[in-house]
Image (tube, rainbow, N blue to C red):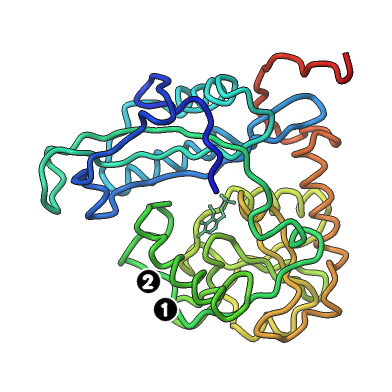
Amino acid sequence: MLEATEKIWHNGKLIKWDDAKLHVLAHVVSYGSSVFEGVRCYDTTRGPAIFRGPEHIRRLIDSAKIYRMDVPFSVEQITDAMVELVRANNLRSCYIRPIVLRGYGDMGVLPKYNPIETYLACWAWGKYLGDEAITQGVDVCVSSWTRIAPNTLPALAKAGANYMNSQLIRMEAEINGYSEGIALDVNGYLSEGSGENLFIVRGGIIYTTPLANSVLNGITRSSVMAIAKSLDIPVVEQPLPREMLYIADEAFFTGTAAEVTHLRSVDRVMIADGKMGPITTAIYEEFFGIVNGKKPDRYNWLTPVKVAAAEPVGV
Ligand SMILES: Cc1ncc(COP(=O)(O)O)c(C=O)c1O
């Protein structure tokens, strides 16, 4: 269950958690008109820090632009507001959820008289696919649901409505005893998980599905691609047939929620010996080294959140 914190940021002001309410006739409730982000703040060895905050907010504003929603705040203002919010809630590590939505006004599909509301919330959060998943890997399936097709719902926009499709994929996987589902695109090529980008390793090369296969332009995806480059591991973006999964040497998901999680099996077919393979391990160690502050922040991905020093224990 969601653990409430004290404050939520709404249109430039901090309000109480319980006061962040919507009218049931807000446009977003009937028509799914929201765009949002998921961002992590890590408790690094140098103090709390937000991972790739400006890139997430740039994507939020891009998502809003695709849907003709004018956000009256800049990338810098919202990034600063995320820092302010984490400080106000006195958290060291948390998940941050920025949301832009069409609010209460007129009722009808055309959102002519519905205000744009911007909210930021944050709360403590653990591992998305379960505590064990991050080290033991996950058993997943290929979904019977197809990912949203091009020119239907735009996949590059992280819009609330896209997650109706994600819900179908994730619920079906859960009912059938899998941790997650991978969707194919409208042409039958691999797309992505319900909330993660997909990587496959074969013969020392990392493959991932391109943006044209109905995937979100993941921030963790781009981080992993940068890390792979620095480790001299080639990354190829190309359409991938489903069966590449079954013959992979390694496969893994990336995402703010899933971080870097290797796939143990797909459709009950074991990937190699089911353990995290060497290339995934190298990426995993570099990724967690950076976000935990144990390795230098060489890409400038972390925005520090200045908080009061922790109380000394036992005094
Ligand atoms: C559908 C989908 N794909 C991919 C991702 C991974 O994106 P990111 O790494 O930016 O969190 C997410 C998570 O936001 C997602 O919901």
Q: Are marks 2 and 1 in contact (CB under 8 Å)?
A: yes
Which residue is drawn at the image coordinates 54% and 33% (left, top)?
A: 54
State the separation of the CA atoms marked 2 and 1.
Answer: 5 Å
204 or 290: nearer the viewer = 290
Q: Which residue is mark 2?
A: 149
From the viewer's perspective, tell me whether residue 257 is left or right of residue 135.
Answer: left
Q: Nearer the viewer, residue 8 or 113?
A: 8
SS label for mark 1: loop
Query: Seen in the image, is 75 located left or right of residue 246?
Result: left
Residue linked to disc 1: 186
Q: For the residue marked with disc 1, what is the amino acid?
A: Val
Residue 237: percent from left, percent from top = 62, 66
Neighbor class of circle 2 (other Cα within 10 Å; few <14, some 14-19, many 20+) is some
The image quarter in which residue 41 lies: top right
Image point (32%, 35%), residue name = 21
| In the depicted structure, whether residue 228 falls above or below residue 98 | below
